Amino acid sequence: MSKHLTTGQQALLTGELELRERELAAQLAAHLHGQTRTERAHELLSQDGDDAPQRAPELAIAAALTDLEQRELEAVRGALGRMARGEYGSCRACGESIPFDRLKVEPWAERCVPCASALEQSKH
């Protein structure tokens, strides 16, 4: 664990991550009805019959939201794993401490702001 975080800050962030993990898992379960994404899409398309072409944009949006939720859930679980291994709060790119204020906003952050910005710039 990054030494710059107090015990109270660590507890707060752990609680936030665990809460978000539960919320995302519940959202995904509700959206997918216990199925994989592919199974759910197939079921919905087969139920629609003639309405399938009209529902395609709605299904695409639902699939995109499910993908976003899944990626965020993976990021949250990754952060909890880093906590368990004592690696939480350090930038994956430069190794510097990620400020508490950044972690409060995005507790699953893997990079400090300068490194996250540099990564985004390199993608464009």
Image (cartoon, rainbow, N blue to C red):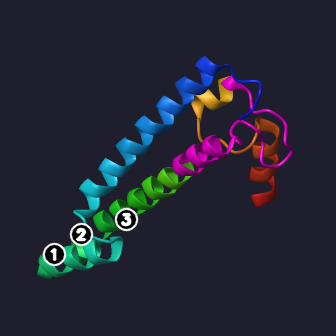
- Residue 25, given in percent of the width and then of the height, sits at 36, 51
The residue to which callout 3 is attached is 63
Front label number (3 vs 1): 3
The residue to which callout 1 is attached is 51
Image: 120 above or below 97: below
| Label 1: which secondary element | helix
Magenta span: 76-100
Residue 55: mark: 2
Residue contact at pointers 2 and 1, CB within 8 angstroms: yes
- Residue 51, given in percent of the width and then of the height, sits at 15, 75
Residue 54 within the magenta-colored segment of the rendering: no
Q: CA distance from mark 2 to mark 3?
A: 12 Å
Residue depicted at x 13% and y 81%: 49
Q: Amino acid at mark 3?
A: Ala
Snapshot quadrant of residue 91: top right
Residue contact at pointers 2 and 3, CB within 8 angstroms: no
Q: CA distance from mark 3 to mark 1?
A: 18 Å
Image: 21 above or below 59: above
Choose between 65 and 100: the one closer to the eye. Answer: 100
- Residue 77, given in percent of the width and then of the height, sits at 52, 50
Does the image show residue 65?
yes
